[in-house]
Image: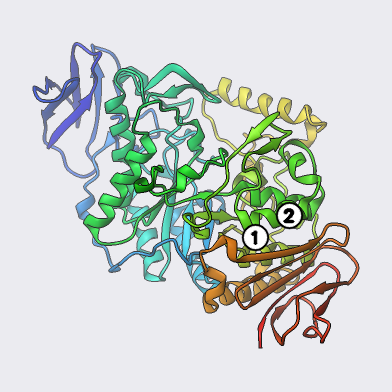
Amino acid sequence: MQFDVWAPQADRVTLQCDGATRALERDPERVGWWTGRAQAVDGTRYGFGLDGGAVLPDPRSRRQPDGPDGLSAVVDHGRYAWRTPWQGRGLPGAVLYELHVGTYTREGTLDAAAERLDHLAELGITHVELMPLTPVPGRHGWGYDGVAPWAVHEPYGGPEALKRFVDRAHELGLGVVLDVVHNHLGPSGNHLPAFGPYFTDTHQTPWGAAVNLDAPGSDEVRAYFLESALAWLRDYRLDGLRLDAVHALHDTRARHFLEELSAAVDGLAAEVGRPLFLVAESDLNDPRIITPRGEHGLGLHAQWNDDFHHALHTALTGESQGYYADFARAPLAALAKTLNRGYFHDGTYSSFRGRDHGRPLDRGRVGAHRLLGYSQTHDQIGNRAQGDRLSATLSPGLLACAATLTLTAPSTPMLFMGEEWAAGTPWQYFTDHTDPELAEAVRQGRRREFAAHGWAEEDVPDPQDPATRERSCLDWSEPEREPHARVLSWYRRLIGLRRELPDLTAPDLADTKVAYDEEGRWLAFRRGDVRVAVNLGKQPAAIPLGTGRLRVLAAWDPVLAPGPDGLLQVPGESCVVLTQA
């Protein structure tokens, strides 16, 4: 078997393979690369030594059986016999479901999660979006401080377990999307700097020096992350990738890394004969990210739309701190704008940022499905001091309103695990750092962060306490009892309507007509023949839906179709979906 490693700064590189050490030779055709051969099979342990130093894991390791600091292991992807033929499932018409493997079940493994996938198929979900799977220190964590961007966290089950998970998902008709992190690596177990200029001080990020996408040596670094992305899609038969915080990918080159990545993914899709897509997390409100490359965009297929979340959250809760301040002045007006124009900040002034922010979407060129809309995500729950979900403070009726707006809006809807039954469990920030100093730094940093917002130290969960993760695990007995069962039934009905009614997946943002009353706390909109009305107030509201015969398709509380005056009487904290009779 051939072993290769990029180590341009080394004078001598050795391979330790299955207990034996041998010298590698410089590759005459690739500058900075070292190569050699050794006997190896699936599972063989190996690592690289640089200039007589300690043996380090392979930067392109496919498996880390003993964690980020241990030796790498060879993975023979050809050994797995795929059971399920799969033609792929694209993004248009999708309903995504964000899932954290470590808390979706108490067991916290991919195999245990796979046993619960029938619940998602019955719900009507089309794609499971897995939070990051790359190795992290210890057993449990969110995944965003991972290293080894080709490998699967061993406590989750490793590479074979991910294949079994994907196989089961595809058997049920579910696509699988993976959250990947290209903007930084974790602070523990990151050995890349020993091998080469993977990071640069030319740019700074919240995590320190930026990934080197444009400084000397960046050709190989770009290839490193690009090939990692393609490997996930090819070797594990994934359907898409969610790219974490692309605004932290600093790249001044004429061809941006994201453009290069999107072209490579489109090329792989043509090669394998099934749709593949990339979804960006971005707070830039820059439509060029999701504009096709042929129209001078970066060519990503979709992006998370936090503006929709912020407007909806503010309308539901009345919260106005931090970035919610921009939306709290007139939350229903902000929500109406996101329903019709996509972004709320499209060149408008942001008090949170102290400057103008964003630019308008060209609604004639950017389809509505390219924006993901949601009422809750791992970030928006877990980055609250106590990880409280909307269900901790809102009535079932308001939760139904949130679901209705998310699942009937023009954007592609995404749910966060447990949301569909108003889970009573929180989802908190937890870590399992094995370095005591790092663990204490994270613990104290979390307390300082929330102390600045008025939280008492004892009210901020300790990320390192195993009980923090335990509290965050879903309780699978909840969906069987009230009020959870009723909320779950409502989600099923809404997802069913989205599947049945073409108007609810129509791509034209401009076709969404919205009316609202800020003081009355109601909002209504029309998409083709479909009408949606939500009353966020406690008192009944008379909501004008226009003349013409309408038929109720779904109502949280009993309602009568509008009379000749076009007014629909909607109970407080309730919602309804109608269509032309």
Q: In which quarter of the image is residue 326?
A: top right
Mark 1 surroundings: few (<14), some (14-19) or many (≥20) residues within 10 A: many
Q: Quadrant of residue 493?
A: bottom right
Residue 148: image location, x then y, percent: 37, 34
Q: Is residue 50 above or below residue 469?
A: above
Instruction: Answer left or right for 571 relative to 505.
Output: right
Q: Quadrant of the N terminus?
A: top left
Residue located 77% across and 66% down the image: 396
The answer to whether one can see residue 216 in this image is: yes
Residue located 66% across and 51% down the image: 309
Q: Which of marks 1 and 2 is nearer the N terminus?
A: 2
**Label 2 sits on residue:** 390
Residue located 82% across and 49% down the image: 318
Is disc 1 in contact with disc 2, using a CB cutoff of under 8 Å?
yes
Residue located 23% across and 17% down the image: 8
Q: In this view, does 287 lie above or below 20?
A: below
Amino acid type of the residue tagged 1 in the rendering: Glu
Near-viewer residue (327 or 416): 327
Residue 435: image location, x then y, percent: 52, 24
Instruction: Answer left or right for 294 relative to 512.
Output: left
The answer to whether one can see residue 421 in this image is: no
Near-viewer residue (456 or 123): 123
Q: Which colour style is shown? A: rainbow
Amino acid type of the residue tagged 2 in the rendering: Leu
**Which numbered disc covers residue 470?**
none
Label 1 to label 2: alpha-carbon separation: 9 Å
Secondary element at tag 1: helix
Near-viewer residue (99 or 225): 225
Q: Is residue 161 above or below residue 538?
A: above
**Label 1 sits on residue:** 419
Secondary element at tag 2: helix
